[in-house]
Image (cartoon, rainbow, N blue to C red):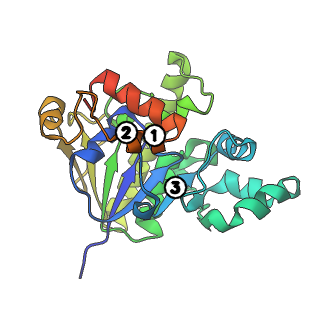
Amino acid sequence: MVEKVWHVIGNGDLAAVYKFRERVGKKLICNMPPFEMPASEVYGTAMVDFKMMMALTGGSVNLDMYPWILGTRPRMWMDDPKQSNFYLKYAPNVREFYTDVPKYAKNATNFNCGMMAVHYAIHKKKADVVHMYGFDTLFDFNMRSITDLYLNSDRGNINNFRLIENWRPVWNGIFKEAEKTTGTKFILHHNHDKLKITTRDNMSVETYDLKEEKKKSKIKSSGEEITKEQFNNMNRHQKRAYEAQLRKGILG
């Protein structure tokens, strides 16, 4: 039997390690991808927030090119009679609704889009293996996200600490549940393996030496990181994220 392999690309700084290898399997992104992802390579983008629905409604974010997998709050938004124009415009984009919020998350607010995408891959798509990129909060006190470039977020230390304290137990629940029920294996991709959550037999970490990977990568720091055409085809949020990653030395 062929393994069902899924890749979930989060929005943390180290999501860029996804680009260091060829990745075979289905791909899920979270809101807007942190780098250019051709629509043909993306199974769907997971969205869970009212703020994202508002940004799509106002036109500040465009995700028309991807199929959408919408969580509990976007479902409420779509069902609101006041949003009938939004529904009529974007209904064709909706691949499906996924409103399963596990009890250990307590509520939809604690269940972010990365969690939803991973949970969806496990329980709806019956993944045998889930690769995870850009889930930096599982390793570090690092709440930076590409999403912050187009949605206002409180990234003060107090709120960051509160979110991490809320999120890490949910991740523990996701991995524990999968270990006991589906047998799904998880491969987390980062630049070190010091996880800040409970490690389990169904979890492993693939680490990258960023300096060595940059040498091997086709993406260079000489001003030819990508082709001019590829850069021009990015939207403004992706350009800003790409340039930020270059400044941090992740890509170049």
Instruction: Kindly identify which numbered label has been placed on residue 45.
Output: 3
Query: Which secondary structure, mark 1?
Result: helix
Provide the residue designation for mark 1: 232
Instruction: Kindly identify which numbered label has been placed on residue 228.
Output: 2
Of marks 3 and 1, which one's residue comes earlier in the chain?
3
Q: Is residue 35 visible?
A: no
Q: Nearer the viewer, residue 95 or 252?
A: 252
Q: Are marks 1 and 2 in contact (CB under 8 Å)?
A: yes
Instruction: Kindly identify which numbered label has been placed on residue 157.
Output: none
Work out how far the residue at label 1 is from the one at label 2, CA to CA, in angstroms: 6 Å
Say which quadrant the N terminus sits in.
Answer: bottom left
Three-letter code, disc 3: Thr
Q: Position of residue 175 (x, y in %)?
A: 36, 53
Other residues around mark 2 within 10 Å, as few (<14) / some (14–19) / many (≥20): few
Work out how far the residue at label 3 is from the one at label 1, CA to CA, in angstroms: 22 Å
Q: Nearer the viewer, residue 95 or 48?
A: 95
Say which quadrant the C terminus sits in.
Answer: top left
Q: Position of residue 246 (x, y in %)?
A: 32, 27
Q: Is residue 86 above or below residue 26?
A: above
